[in-house]
Image (spheres, grey):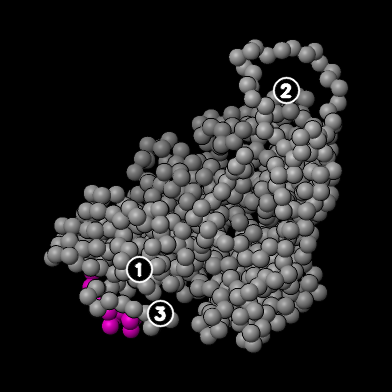
Amino acid sequence: MNLLFETSREGHGCSILPPCDVPVTSLPETELRRKELRLPQLAEVDISRHYSALERRAHGVNNGFYPLGSCTMKYNPKINDEMAALPGFAGIHPLQPAHTVQGCLEVLATAEQYLCEITGMDAMTFQPAAGAHGELTGLLLIKAYHQSRGDTGRTKIIVPDAAHGTNPASAAMAGFTVVNVPSNDKGCVDLEKLRAAVGPDTAGLMLTNPNTVGIFDEAILEITKIVHDAGGLNYYDGANLNAVMGVVRPGDMGFDVIHLNLHKTFSTPHGGGGPGSGPVGCKQLLADFLPLYYAKKAGDGYAFVQPAQSVGSVKAFYGNFLVVVRALAYLFTLGGDGVREAAQNAVLNANYLREKLKDTYEVAFDGICMHEFVLTLEKLKKEQDVSALDVAKTLLDHGIHPPTMYFPLIVHEALMVEPTETESRETLDAAAEIFRSVYEQALRDPQSLHDAPTTAPVRRPDEVAAARNPRLRYQF
Amino acid sequence: MMNNPSELLYTRSHEWVRFLTETTAQVGLTDYAQHSLGDLVFVNLPQEGDEVTQGESFADVESVKAVSDVYSPVTGTVKAINEVLLDAPETINKDPYGAWLVEVENITDREELLSADDYAVHCEKED
C-alpha cells in the first residue's frame, strides 16, 4: 500500500478553506520559511480513500470480537461521539476566557464528581493523556507528598511481578527505585515477601486489583495496611477497574491515588492513537499537589484553580478534553445501576468463556475469575511446537483479534482473554468454537499455524527487523 | 539436546561463567536462555568500573516478547563490556557461548555454580 507521500501528485490539492475574514498582515522576513513545506499534494477523495484502505487493513471493535486482555476493548456507543461533536465542545479554543466555556468546565467538574464517587477518591485531574502518563502523574503526587513532609528517604516503589510493565517504567521515570515482590501460587501478592520488602525507604506500592491474571486479591486490605504502616502510600493502577466499578471502590480498599483509563473502562476510542485519557484521582491528603487547570465550582459557575502545592502541568492545558466528554456521556447513559451491571456482565462473560474453553486449553489459575483470565499454552508449545503467537496469528484468519500474548510474564506462553460486557452470548459461543477448532488444528496440522495468518491483509510482519532497525520517518 | 561446553560453569538463572583466572571471569547467557527468549533486539550492559553483586541484576536483554534481567553469578567489578552486542544483539542468539556480556575482575564472591551436566539436568526440569 502506498503512503500519502507516494500518492502525492504535483498540483493536486483541496480547496476547503473558507475565505479569510480577518485582515491580512505579513510576517517579518526573518520569520518566514525559506523552503516550502514538503506536504503531500492530494485531492480530498484520495485522502479519504487512503484512510478507508488503512481501516480495512486493521481490526477494531467495529470489525469483530476483540478480547485483548487488560485493554477492555468494549464497544464505544455512538452517542459518545455525537456529544463530543457538539460545537460548544468541539469548536472551542484552549485560551478562551473561562466565563465563555462554563459548560466545558462543568463537564470536567461533573466527570470528576462521578468518577470520584465510583473510585472512592476526593479529587481528580484530567490532564494526563493516557494510563502510563497517569501513573507518572500519580507517582509525582506521592513524591511531592513525602517531600513536603521532609520525608526524603522514601526512594522505593514496590511493584508485584505480575504488574503491568508500565508500573516499573513509570516508577523509574519518576526517579524511584523499583522493588519487585513475587506473586504466590494463586497469582496474588505474597504477603510475607511484601512485609519483608517495606521499610522506611518505601515511598509506595503500585497494584492492579483485580490483578493481571484476572483474580481479585482478597488480602487487599492487609496489603494496603502493610504499606501504610510502613509510611508508604498505595497507588491503584485502574486498568482493570472494569471488573469492579460500581461494586467496590479502590478508595475503600486502602488506595490513596489511582489512575483511570477512560479509553478502556469508560468506552472512549482506544488503540491506534486514541487519543486516550488517564485521569488521576487522589485522597484529600494529595489534592494540594494535583496538576494545574483544576476545574472547581466557584460561586454560581466554575473556575480553573491552581492547587496550593501543584506539581505543575503534565500536559498542555486540560488534557484530552473531548475524551472526557465521551466518558461523561457514557456515565449519563448507564447511570449508577448501569455502571454496576456493566462490571457484573464483564465478569460473567469472562467466566462463561473460561468455562467453555477450560477443557480444551489449560487455564493458568483455577477458579472463578474477574473480567479476564489467562491461558497457558506451554503444553501445546512443548508437544506440537505451536506457540501462543502461532495461535494468536491463526485467530486473525477467523476474524478474531488475538488476546494479549506473553503477558503476564509469570505465565509461560500466555494468552490473556478479556471479552468485556458488550459481547453477546452468541458472540462468545462462536468465539469459543473458533478457539477450540484452532486447538484441534494445532494437534492435526501444526505447520498450518506456523504459516498463519493466510487470509488477513497483512501476513507476519518481521517484528525482529522492526525492533532492530526501526524506520520511523519517511525518507524523501 | 543443548550444547553446553563442559569447561564453563552455569547458574540456575541461565547465565554461564568462564573463569579466566581465579578472580576474573566472563559472563554470558546460555543456549537454553537465548532459545527461550527468542530473537534478541536490544541489550543493556553496565559500564566499565560498575560493581556487580552475586544474584543481582546487572544487565537486561530484550526480545520481541519481553525484557528480561540478567543476574550476576559473581561479585566483583566490571572490567570490560562486549560492545559488539550493543549493535548486534543477535550475536547472542547465533553464538551464545562466544557472546560474553561482561568481564568481571576482583571477584570476591560467587554463587554455587553448576557443572555442564548438572545444568543440563536443571534445564530438563525447567521444561
Question: Does residue A126 lie above or below A207 as drawn?
Answer: above
Would you name the residue on which mark 2 appears?
A97
For disc 2, the chain is: A
**Number of marks in the rendered image:** 3
Question: Does residue A243 lie above or below A128 as drawn?
Answer: below
For marks 2 and 3, give the CA distance: 64 Å
Q: Which of A374 and A99 is in front in this view?
A: A374
Q: Which structural element holds mark 3?
A: helix
Would you name the residue on which mark 1 appears?
B96
The part of the chain drawn in magenta is B111-122
Q: Looking at the picture, how far across and down is residue B82, in whole percent?
A: 30, 56
- Split into 4 quadrants, where in the image is the C terminus of chain A? top right
Which residue is found at the position 41% from the left and 67% from the top?
B93
Q: What residue type is labelled 1?
A: Pro
Asked whether, in this view, residue A154 is left or right of residue A241, the answer is left
Which residue is found at the position 82% from the left and 39% from the top?
A43
Q: Which structural element holds mark 2?
A: loop
Q: Which of A92 and A100 is in front in this view?
A: A92
Q: Mark 1, residues whose alpha carbon is within 10 Å: few (<14), some, or many (≥20)?
A: many
Q: Which of A198 and A7 is in front in this view?
A: A7
For disc 1, the chain is: B
Would you name the residue on which mark 3 appears?
B126
Q: Looking at the picture, how far across and down is residue A370, in whole percent?
A: 63, 69
Contact flag, marks 1 and 3 (Cβ < 8 Å): no
